[in-house]
Amino acid sequence: MSFLLSRLLSALVVMFGVATLVFLLIHLVPGDPVEVMLGESARPADRELLRHSLGLDQPVQVQLVQFYQNLLRGDLGQSLHSQRPIADMIGERIGSTAILAGAALLCAILIAVPLGMLAAVKKDTWADYGAMGFSLLGVSIPNFWLGPMLILVFALHLGWVPVSGSDSWTALILPAVTLGTSMAAILSRMVRSSMLEVMGEDHIRTARAKGLSTGRILLHHALRNAMLPVLTILGLQLGVLLGGAVITETIFAWPGIGSLLVDSIMRRDYPVVQGCVLLIALIYVTVNTLTDILYAQVDPRVTLK
């Protein structure tokens, strides 16, 4: 119980820090949202009237206090651009981001686990070198380059999948591969390292002495005991996954939180940017907390005290 309370307290502190930093940094970004909304040809009187109605003429500290008061009530406010509730705007987009993140995570696991196991079993062979070469390549290639390259090859040249959008399930393939490749590269190295460590332990040698098949030893004994550090990387990489989704969703015009965040930054829509960043931070903190709790389920030696 004390472990859970400490984790919840640290999560609240992190969220408070993120909310404060995002609020202050966004207000330091050059640009006036009123000018973006009304245009450069608007009269000064109209600009001041709109700025007053939105509360942007108040000191930053007053706006910060008002922001926290609304946040404690669960009110994220309204968009400066569309005047719609931010919670509704995020609710319309979060499903698409969840689908993309889930598909990318599945893609990463399907690539990383077999690749890491193959590299561990075939250590110091061409299979091992090839798997680790793919890992290095996947980490080195950024999403903003890989995405357009996949579009050029598989969408424009071969015509197998749509260029962008979310009208069909095939439109999910390229963004999921783009987002999941770098994560698969990191996971495959961790799976290989964990498998090599576990395969040298006594219980693996005992399983071999009993005459168990290689497949059963790898899947039921080695892989299960090697999953603890892999879970750690999965939890930590979720933040990277959500961060990469901002770029990937923009490239493929995927209607998720990432594209909403970029559009809001371009429009200087401060409340929407704050809501999106707070949601990403909340998901990141929640997943890391759940990862700590899952340790006890995967490894009985870990206790939650």
Image (spheres, grey):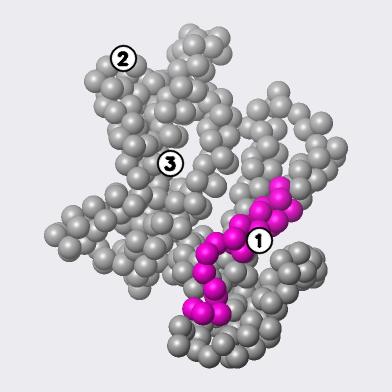
> Front-most of 68 and 54?
54
**Relative to residue 200, is residue 34 depicted above or below?**
below
What is the secondary structure assignment of the residue under circle 3?
A: helix
Q: Work out whether residue 216 can be spotted.
A: no
- How far is disc 3 from disc 2 in space, using C-alphas? 23 Å
**Disc 2 crowd, CA 10 A, few/some/many (<14, 14-19, 20+):** few
Q: Given this view, does label 1 or label 3 mark the residue nearer the observer?
A: 1
Residue placed under numbered mark 3 in the picture:
183
Judge from the rendering whether residue 4 lies leftward or rightward of residue 213; answer left or right.
Answer: right
Q: Between disc 1 and disc 2, whose residue precedes? A: 1
- What is the quadrant of residue 69 in the picture? bottom right
- Name the chief secondary structure element in magenta: helix
Figure quadrant of the N terminus: top right
Camera-side mark, 1 or 2 = 1
Give the label on residue 23, or none.
Answer: 1
Q: Residue at x 66, y 61 (%)?
A: 23
Q: In x, y percent, where is residue 304?
A: 77, 33
Q: Can the viewer see residue 289 in this picture?
A: yes
Q: Is residue 37 magenta?
A: no
Disc with the residue nearer the chain's start (1 vs 3): 1
Position of residue 194 measured from the top left corner of the image (x, y, whole percent): 49, 23
**Residue located beneath label 2 in the image:** 124
* Side of 105 relative to 20 (left or right): left
Q: Secondary structure at mark 2?
A: loop
What residue type is disc 3 on? Answer: Met
Task: Name the element at disc 1.
Answer: helix
